Image: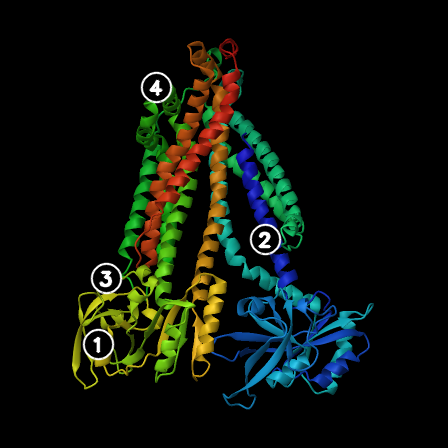
Amino acid sequence: MTGLAVLVAAFVVFGTVMAREITVRTTLDHFSDTPAATSVVAVSQGDGSGITEALTDAVRQTPGVAEATARTGTQVPLSGVFDRLLELKSDPGRGQLSRLKVMTGAYPRGGHKVAVNEQAARHWDIEPGDLIRMQIPRNDGTEQTRRVTVTVTGVVAAQSDRMEAAYASAAAINAMSDLKGSDRLDIRTEPGVSSQALSQRLSTVFNSYDTRVETVTGAEVRAEEARGAVSQYEDFFLIVAMFLAITVVAAALVATSTFRVVFAQRVGELALLRMIGAHRHQLVRSLAAEGAVVGLAAGTAGVVLALVAGHAAPTLAGLAGQDLSAPGTPVGAALAVVAGAALTTVAAVLAPAVSAAGVSPLQALRNADTLPAERGIGKRRLSLGLTFAAAAAGLVGIVLAHVPDPGDSAYEPSGNLAMIVLSGTLAFLALVALGPVVIRPVLAAAGWPLRRLGPVGNLAVGGMGGAPRRAASVSLVVALGITLVSGTFVGITTMRSHADGRLALQAPADFALDGPEKGLAPGLVRRVEKLPQLADTTSYRQAVISVEGAGTEGVSATDMDLEALPSSSKISAATGNVSALGPGRVILGATLAEDLGVRAGDNITLKTARGGDLHALVAATLPEEGPLAADMVLSNTDLDATGVPPGATGVLANAAQAGPAGRNAAATSIAEVSEDQDDVHLRTLAQDRERSDDDITLLATMALGLLGLTVLIAVVGVATTTGLTVRERTRESGLLRALGLSRSGLRTSIGLEAGLYGALGSVLGLALGVAYAWLVIQALNLGSPLHLPYAQLGLLCAGLTAVTMLTGLLLSRHAARVSPVTALGTEE
């Protein structure tokens, strides 16, 4: 029991090391641009066209070269109203230097044929046999383009791709895109030929073509890509390390509490050692050595379990259809984790060891085999706790004093966030120091409903109240987990609300059909509005107008009808009320409001078409830019007064049917009715909302997954403390049974006492978590109110209380099975 929390922490820490190994190796194996069979990479040092087809053929004829393929590529837009970009990449399509796997159709052979990757096929509904038209920039120094139509011959899987792409041979891509050569050659040597020897032969070939080409081994290129793969995840694993540090602290607190109970049960043995001449420092060293042995054993077990799990992960992932690379065996990291587990356990055991070693030798002559519970704290500990609390409160005051008004673009929150972390740390240290004092009023409030249950409830509350230090140490571990998880719940909910408000301005609908400055044809607007595949269709104008005090360049203004779109309900104002928009009332974006120095309730002056003034009241200011990056939203009558032509410059619409199928059908219908008008293109704004939602969901999942480790440690702490307490109070349990308490009543009492650990920790953790989540939102200056997910917070606290209670009930079975006679006969 003393090593269980440390074992879990060691497993988690070394499991993270293994996860990092798997991540880096998987990234290198599956997302590398250099196939593993590449022996030598030749890179042009010129303008990207230094490796011609003639030079490529000469390389293939060089002795020792088994295979060589040119790498070239470019990025081109597709023709049509869709705003779509396609990467053109070269690949041989077969052989050991190919990075592709053909899924359907065939790989292209010949000109004006390509194979698209799975992303393009899925997102743009492309199948083998389809024709796609690309706008290829002319290679003559002008901005003109030419339209090239190509046939899709197949769909390929390319794990290194991060966006939509099409593949063909280097010669075909050069012919289609007006490129003159390649910037890289991947070369595979024949068996028995070293990369160094081949590089020397190739240098002669390159010199004969008077071309500056540098050769490097494939191993070196892949090593550089490996370093890039590591750096790509450094920030993520840095955040993980922070959460792991919290987990280790939680494990240390649990170990401290557990050893305190264990040493208290051996007070008779320790007193006898003192009586026969053992010094206090000898006992401290002996108990610390015991902790070190426990830490070594627990750390080793945790590392071994994590190692087994890490090597089993690729196999299990394969069963789920995922392809992960096998990790290595990082011996150095394993030894470091084992040593860290031992040191953590020694640090956790010192305070209980010093306390237990101070037992009086006369205790050996007494009947009790445990020390009476210490109910209070000393003056030194009290003053230390109050100092921590005062410092935490002072940092909170400094943070609030340095938060500017919403919309301040010059504000940098990193300093305030660092102070919040420090304040939270000090607040928790204050809670640790003052725990036995703080726990009493909280226990009185949380235990009041249990006392209404009669003797069973009174026993549960009295059992915890009789050992406030133990109750505080275990409840604080639960509080740590609840603080972090509840704060994350509140922060994620508020950030999601803020993101929804921001996207309601940046991407107010699923689609935006943009036209030229002269506006869209009225017939086109009517055709789009009548499409059955669309809903919430609204046209708008966006133009540059003059505002007094905003400079000579003017500001971007729009008369978009915010109430016509469901997303407008998610817009929150920095000042004022968004719904107050109307004739003579305007809404300003954050930048314009800051430039003009105004807020809701102030007046601004617009310039009319006849050079006059139009006074308008600021109905609201926004925390960011206005809809579709406009600086101002005003009514259509006010926009008319500024001289803007009546023709709509854009149309916003949502898909009538939710999901990718509905959006594809809607986009296709818009494209069909828009083909006859020039300078029109369609943007799919729904993808921005989906990416934002996916990013927040991924962030929440990772954070809660990591924080869940702290909650797991807390549950382990409750289990170990409850289990040891049951053993410690065997005689007390027997006496209660002898006085008439039933087995179920005894089990219920122990279960309720364990549940109280979860309840007390939930109350303390919820108070800290919500308070610091609010402080973080203020420091980020999002201009968004705090949103409390009441259901999630309630389920979190109720769930953890139920889990700790269930743990107590399971562990109470042994105490309930012991007969009263046996329990009362237990030796002291």
| Amino acid type assigned to the residue bearing label 4 in the image | Gly
> Which residue has dot 1 on it?
638
Residue at point 61%, 34% (across, down): 297
* Horizontal and vertical percent position of residue 517: 35, 83
Specify the amino acid type for callout 1. Answer: Asp
On residue 454, which mark appears? 4
Q: CA distance from mark 2 to mark 1?
A: 58 Å
Mark positioned earlier in the residue sequence (1 or 3): 3
Disc 3 residue type (three-letter): Asn
How dense is the environment of label 3, judged by Cα within 10 Å: few (below 14), some, or many (20 and up)? some
Marks 2 and 4: CB-CB under 8 Å? no
- N-terminal of the two: label 4 or label 3? 4
The tag earlier along the polypeptide, 3 or 2, is 2
> Residue placed at 44% from the left, 78% from the top?
673
The label nearer to you, 1 versus 4, is 1
Q: Is residue 171 visible?
A: yes
Q: Which residue is mark 2?
A: 20
Task: Tell me the CA gap for discs 2 and 4.
Answer: 53 Å
Q: Earlier in the sequence, mark 1 or mark 4?
A: 4
- SS state under label 2: helix
Between label 2 and label 1, give the one nearer the viewer. Answer: 1
What is the crowding at mark 4: few (fewer than 14 residues within 10 Å), some, or many (at least 20)?
few
* Residue highlighted by disc 3: 577
Q: How is the image coloured?
A: rainbow
Which quadrant of the rendered structure holds the N terminus?
top right
In the image, residue 520 sits, relative to residue 323, either above or below, namely: below
Spatial CA distance of label 3 from label 2 is 48 Å
How far apart are the two marked residues, 1 and 3, measured between alpha carbons?
Answer: 19 Å
Horizontal relation, residue 586 to residue 257: left or right:
left
Q: Is residue 263 visible?
A: no
